[in-house]
Image: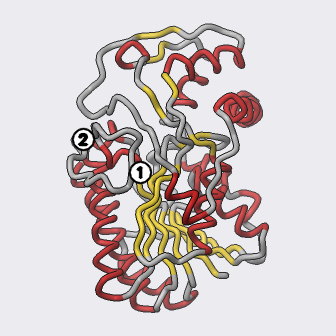
Amino acid sequence: MKVLITGAAGFIGSHLCERLLARGDTTIALDTFNDYYDPERKRENLHQLRNHPCCILSKTDIRDAEAIDRLFAEHRPEAVVHLAAYGAVRYSIGRAKLYTDVNIRGSINLLEAAREIGVENFVFASTSSVYGNTKHLPFVETDPCNQPLAPYPASKRAVELMGYTYHHLHGLNFTALRFFNVYGSRGRPDMMPFIVTDSIVNRREIVLFDGGQMKRDWTYIDDIIDGVIAAIDKPLGYELINLGRGEPVIMTDLVEIIEGLVGHKAILSTPPAPLSEPKITFADIAKARRLLGYNPQISLKAGLRQFWEWYQQAVMN
């Protein structure tokens, strides 16, 4: 299969490229290598793939509709996995124009190009943040998700809705995968497991909102990639599907595990949570199990141990 991956040099994208190439697929790896975080880290993520005969690298901005159209027309991918976006809930506050431009307008460019050449399946990386402060626990896909807490989840929800329009009008298979707190090797420096680990190593203060009592559904990268590949391989019409672990963990427990791995205590600050932060993320993964055969395997302790091994090699050396 020929698969176009946007955001291919990022955390999730680079892992997905590796897995698809390992099973014999051709990947069109698209990224802008922007400076949201160090572009050198992104280049390093794809370093081993640069000379792979089945990996086509493209430095392209999804906001450039003409460039996207040319790329699709030239390579004619059978499937698209759209990971490229500005992420992070808190960073999005005050940057609604940027998030609209990249996350919404860029996504429309991809949907239009996919429609034009008849892409068989479009898999979209959405987020658990679309659930906001829902009272329905665990988070289930039938929740209306109509009260996002920041521009980032609002932009993701907008693309989910536009995906339905393209399915309804043009017959495009569109699956939105709502990722829950993904972590693992190559994790972005603005993600909490990296922040906690790096802060403990370098003796910096860590901000844990609400006394560290907020809960997150941490999901290891390998489990997420299993779910993404299952979605690529199974066009479903139009679906919204949670990809999490289904086991919320108190933030202080996450910190304690990392303290044990690093061998130092964390320095904590525990202010009240801002309005952009939900109290809990908690995935109902029954639908993912049923439709995708999704079955997350890696516990938080095991996943953080693997993350720590990567951190020592990639960041400390």
Residue placed at 49% from the left, 85% from the top? 119
Question: How busy is the neighbourhood of tag 1: few (under 14 within 10 Å), some, or many (20 plus)?
Answer: many
Q: Which residue was labeled with disc 2?
A: 149
Q: Say which of 120 and 59 sits in front.
A: 120
The residue sitting at 51% across, 85% down in the picture is: 120
Q: Amino acid at mark 1?
A: Thr
Label 1: state its secondary structure: strand
Asked whether, in this view, residue 134 is left or right of residue 176, the answer is left
For residue 136, which quarter of the picture? Answer: top left
- Rounded to the nearest angstrom, the CA distance separating label 2 from label 1 is 12 Å
Question: Where's residue 242, x and y in %?
Answer: 47, 53
Q: Quadrant of residue 156?
A: bottom left
Q: Nearer the viewer, residue 75 or 78?
A: 78
Tell me where residue 18 appears, x and y as whole percent. 72, 61
Check residue 152 in the rendering and tell me which mark sits there, or answer none: none
Does label 2 or label 1 sit earlier along the sequence? Answer: 1
Q: Is residue 63 left or right of residue 226?
A: left
Q: Residues within 10 Å of mark 2 (few under 14, many from 20)?
A: many
Q: Position of residue 62 (x, y in %)?
A: 41, 69
Which amino acid type is shown beneath numbered disc 2? Leu
User: What residue is disc 1 on?
Assistant: 127
Q: In the structure shown, which secondary structural element does the residue marked by tag 2 occupy?
A: loop
